[in-house]
Image (tube, rainbow, N blue to C red):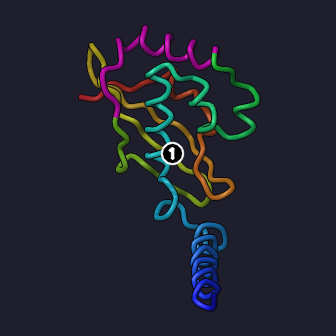
Amino acid sequence: MKILVIQVAVIAASLLVVAGVVFWIGDRSVLVPSPSATLEGFFRNLTTRRYVRALPYLTDSLAERVTPDDLRLLLDSLTARTGDVMNETGEGEGERMDGDMAEAVVSVETSVGTFAITLPMRRGQGVWKIAGLDGLLHPVAEH
């Protein structure tokens, strides 16, 4: 019984250390997904037309204003300009962080070329979320 109490205490202490690093010290990319990883997950759900699963990647204030149909229309508008999406990868080197704000870039390979899409990110409650979707309307062709 004494060993069980010690094990529970060690686990609780470990969880407190992780929580301290994420919330009090302000970890932005070691123990939490980076802005690029967050954007890549969002874009994977978007391009596979899992719009409801894409919504949790958005900040609360953005998610209140965006519906799955809005995401469908954004993707349709994007593919009308760039061609069908064939592959996407997060580009960490395109990531810029400043406190709890960041920009992340996803590189999208389409049927007509490769495009970079940059979206603003905001860190809240220990995780990065997408703060705006205007970048989907303005993809930049990569050479």
User: In this image, 85 relative to 26: left or right?
Assistant: left
128 is higher (above) or lower (below) than 133: below
| Disc 1 secondary structure class | strand
At x 59%, y 20%, the residue is: 71
Residue density around tag 1, few if under 14, some if 14–19, many if 20 or more, within 10 Å: some
At x 65%, y 67%, the residue is: 23
Image location of residue 138, percent across then percent down:
48, 23
> What secondary structure is the stretch in magenta mostly built from?
helix
At x 57%, y 30%, the residue is: 53
Bounds of the magenta segment: 69-88
Image location of residue 36, percent across then percent down:
44, 46
> Residue at the front extreme?
1
- Which of the 4 quarters of the picture holds residue 27? bottom right
Image location of residue 105, percent across then percent down:
42, 39
Is residue 131 covered in magenta? no
At x 75%, y 37%, the residue is: 61
Q: Which amino acid type corresponds to the residue marked 1 in the rendered image?
A: Glu
The residue wearing badge 1 is 103
4 is higher (above) or lower (below) than 124: below
Image location of residue 96, percent across then percent down:
47, 52
